[in-house]
Image (cartoon, grey):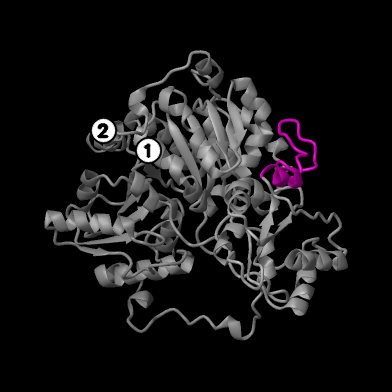
Amino acid sequence: MAERSFKAEVEHLRKGAGDTFTGEGILAITKALLENGVGYVGGYQGAPISHLMDVLADAEELMAELGVRFEANASEAAAAAMLAASVHYPIRGAVTFKGPVGVNVASDALANLCSSGVNGGALIIVGEDYGEGSSIMQERSHGFAMKSQFWLLDPRPNLPSITKAVKDGFELSEASNTPVMLMVRIRSCHVTGSFETRDNVAPPLTVKQAIANPQSDFNRVVLPPMSYVHEQDKIKNRWPAAERFITENKLNEVFGPEKAPLGIVVQGGMYNGLIRALQRLGLADVFGKTEVPIYCLNVTYPIVRDEFDAFCAGKDHILVVEEGQPEHIEQQLGAFLYKAGAKLKLYGKDVLPMAGEYTGQVMLDGVTAFLKAAAPEMLPGKVRAPNAEAPQIPDLSKTVPIRPPGFCTGCPERPIFAGMKLVEQELGKHQITGDIGCHLFGSLPPFEIGGATMGYGLGPAANAAFDGGGERRAISMLGDGGFWHNGLSSSIGNMVFNKSDNVVVIVDNYYSAATGGQDVLSSRAHNDTKSTGNPISAALKGVGVEWIRQIDHTYDVAKVRDTVREALLT
């Protein structure tokens, strides 16, 4: 089961050399993986990358024909650990998950992977969930790439560029023995377009062939003294190799006139927005022909200093278009200029906002502010005039009511909170934490139950500080998706080990609703390739939970109320 079936679209993945593929970004990435000899693919679903996992699940038959192994991993950490197959074997592997929360969950495995380095190409495809369409905290994955030193691709949001980035990513990884992160933003994941396809390629070495002849290299193990050698290898060998590959293969792109007094450095993923802003100012056309030089960073880490210096030659003003904070790229480029004693002026977060999504209007305002300071003569007359500012947008909050998300009409989770609310009216307010997913809607009116969430499956762990034998027990919400992702070990196991007296309400709707409707271990649906029908109650008993009550009909509000009361008073 999944949010959407791609059975029909998957047939397009069989297209070969000379054919044209038309569809959305997620499908294009899947096709590019098959064209580039990937040996195994895994990941964990979550917007905006859920559809990639759904596509892969629907394409298992095709991948099996090519000898490609597919794994729907239990978590992002499990997915990242799967890339260990590329450490000792020359096998290309790819995993995917939502970022940056997925990167956070996978951080232990990713850090070890980056230390040991890889033999085969290792690609981490991250759905960068930032901006107004995001469902998580507003952070970037860029900082983790810098911390662990794996290379970060941010391709222009069109299908030819995205599919090329998959190919470039594998080759860059192999050329520098370093894992590569391919970042696809929300709009990149769902952009539609077309590209000329190539034949699918079976992996030169399959995982089945590799396991028949096991390999190991003690120098790859992340233990002293090898870990110290790994760090030196990163700086002395892998980094220069990556820069050579980036430069020689022109992974970054330069557009516009060769000579001009100003220029713009932009993340590849923000290229379309920048071109649109220049088009609105009459400085570019719809095909990308621009009067302002653009240095497009399809690789945002590492920054190749020689390329940047060449772009800056002869220019007096440079704008950095970098969405999100901190301004990692702007700081790096500023350091380059300072150390070189350059006189040119660097613009960035002074004309563009430090935080928030760079929407069309935000981009237009920022580029206009830059040009007003650097080259006012390039602007149209009415924009160049000092008093001709954009009209003020009315404050819609005065007339349009706020509409926070809430439970769907008839949702079987709603009566659970109704029962809990009745108990609250009787016994008073309790300390309650939530879990990622619909349960968080309970923190909003009219229920106002729960006020914190610290991660997928971590609701009970978030209440551990309140397990001190006080007058009232704390209550934690946990969904079935969160339970199987991280909750069984980090929350339930933690409670059992510490002899917790708190209460956990587990909402089991038999699939992972928070990530798009995929099956989990406790799903009741039959799944030919996955093990389902494993009840959560059995898992709880297995780790030592003794007090368990199960309610199968949540619309029985009185029973919910009485059971919650029993849990709090027994």
Which amino acid type is shown beneath numbered disc 2?
A: Val
Which residue reaches farthest bottom?
Answer: 398
Query: Which quadrant is home to the N terminus?
Result: top right
- Residue 229: mark in rendering: 2
Give the SS element for disc 1.
helix
Q: Earlier in the sequence, mark 1 or mark 2?
A: 1
Q: Is residue 531 magenta-colored?
A: yes
Q: Which residues are magenta?
A: 521-543
Residue 250 in percent (x, y) is at 32, 38
Between 386 and 317, which is closer to the camera in this rendering? 317
Is residue 264 among the parts visible in the rendering? no
Instruction: Look at discs 1 and 2 and give the one toward the viewer.
Output: 2
Residue 522 visible in rendering: yes
- Is 232 left, or right, of 557 in this rendering? left
**Main secondary-structure element of the magenta-colored stretch:** loop
In the depicted view, which residue is nearer to us: 163 or 45? 45
* Amino acid under disc 1: Cys
Q: Residues within 10 Å of mark 2 (few under 14, many from 20)?
A: some
Between residues 66 and 206, which one lies in front from this camera angle? Answer: 206
Q: Which mark is residue 114?
A: 1
Taking the spot 33% from the left edge, 70% from the top edge, the residue there is 351
Residue at (47%, 69%) from the top-left corner? 361
Residue 490 sits above or below residue 61 on the image? below
- Residue 470 sits in which quadrant? bottom right
Please provide percent x and percent y for residue 282. Answer: 39, 64
Q: Quadrant of the C terminus?
A: bottom right
Q: Is residue 422 magenta?
A: no
